Image (tube, rainbow, N blue to C red):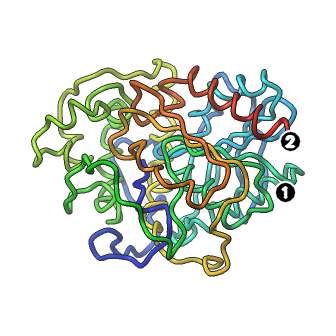
Amino acid sequence: MVPSHALIPAALTRRSFLQTTGALAGALALPGLVRGAEVRPAPGMPAPRFVETNGIRMAVYEQGTGIPVVLCHGFPELAFSWRFQLPALADAGFRAIAPDQRGYGLTDRPEDVTEYSLRHLCDDMAGMLDALEIDRAVFVGHDWGGGVVWMMARLHPDRCLGIVGVNTPGGRPPGMPRRRPTEEPLIVRSENYYTVQFQEPGRAEKALSADVRKSFEMLLRRGYIWDVEAFKAMPADSPERQMDLLRMLDREDYPGEVFLSDEALDYFTETFEITGFTGGLNWYRMAGRPFPGMESAKWEIDVPCLYIGAENDVILRPSSADGMEDFIDDFEKYTVADCGHWTQQEKPEETNRVLIDWLRRKIAKTA
């Protein structure tokens, strides 16, 4: 889950982005992790191919032919999160491409935390296109993947045919005045906010890895924190209202229901029991930090863009995309009703319908 304030690099604050040092991958004896096992390819998806990009070996799942559509996942997810979109896009005449991104799944997990900057993550995507002999693609990103695809339009505009953010809005260009929010934040911010907790090396790893299946059952569910009205009714000092994920894991049971199939829950659990969470957490540890190319980035976006929000996402509210038309000429918004944060997995049919309709109108007709 990516907070909207992490989408544009800015000066670090002591509260939001604490200094982290040292490499963590493989260095901590964490409970719940399976040592020596190998990650298996995602079930029900095409066999992955492996490409060399930007100094790492990346697993890439592909299906279909036509205009390339790259699908970038978030935290804590995998290319598998797009299992419903690959066949739908292929059937609609597109070439769907879903990588396990840096730090995840079958892809390499560098130990150095500084190798997880947005510069690295975007250069990974550009290098992947080179390896696949693709000039330009549509980039679709959910959660942290949304942060990557919006930055692709700034750092690699020549590689982008269009951009789609699923739940994640694009940050405003530096120096552009902020718009007045159209709604009050639902989360009560404190030092317990999850992005602050994620900064301390080992802390979140220990909590999330203690019972990996429980971690996924708590996060990837319908209802509970992904129900706006129920969320508003929770006490202001509750772990939920403060989005204190680590304390939320102490609960024995949760309202709502897991929407994943048993097979999907098994694969997420099995994979993260092997890889741990450090790779994905390192994205947060580098969030907001300056990186090469920021000064010369092209902040206004010229290609067609779509934002797909979710009614019950309490972190990335649909209103977070208000004002994006200030720096994007061709911009559309759509909100999926009765849906939480994990939109393309919770409401795949509606997500596919909206995405494919937009691709046909905005991309295929002009290709």
Which residue position is annotated with label 1? 130
Q: Which mark is residue 160?
A: none
Image quarter of residue 209: top left
Sequence-wise, the earlier of marks 1 and 2 is 1
Residue appearing at x 78%, y 24% in the figure: 92
Residue 257 horizontal side relative to residue 324, left or right: left
Residue 267 horizontal side relative to residue 255, left or right: right
Residue appearing at x 62%, y 81% in the figure: 295
Q: How far separated are the C-alphas under marks 1 and 2?
A: 23 Å
From the viewer's side, name the closer residue of 106 and 366.
366
- Indicate the quadrant containing the C terminus: top left, top right, bottom left or bottom right: top right
Residue appearing at x 61%, y 76% in the figure: 294
Residue 305 horizontal side relative to residue 336, left or right: right
Contact flag, marks 1 and 2 (Cβ < 8 Å): no
Mark 1 neighbour class, 10 Å CA radius: few under 14, some 14 to 19, many 20 or more: some
- Report how many numbered discs are placed on residues in the image: 2
From the viewer's side, name the closer residue of 119 and 137.
137
Which residue position is annotated with label 2? 366
Q: Is residue 96 above or below residue 261?
A: below
Say whether residue 244 is visible. Answer: no
Position in image of residue 171 (x %, y %):
51, 61
Residue appearing at x 52%, y 46% in the figure: 74
Give the secondary structure at mark 1. Answer: helix
Q: Is residue 10 above or below residue 347?
A: below
Image quarter of residue 85: top right
From the viewer's side, name the closer residue of 192 and 88.
88
Amino acid under label 1? Asp
Residue 176 horizontal side relative to residue 69, left or right: left
Nearest to the eye among marks 1 and 2: give it. 2
Amino acid under label 2? Thr
Position in image of residue 207 (x %, y %):
29, 48
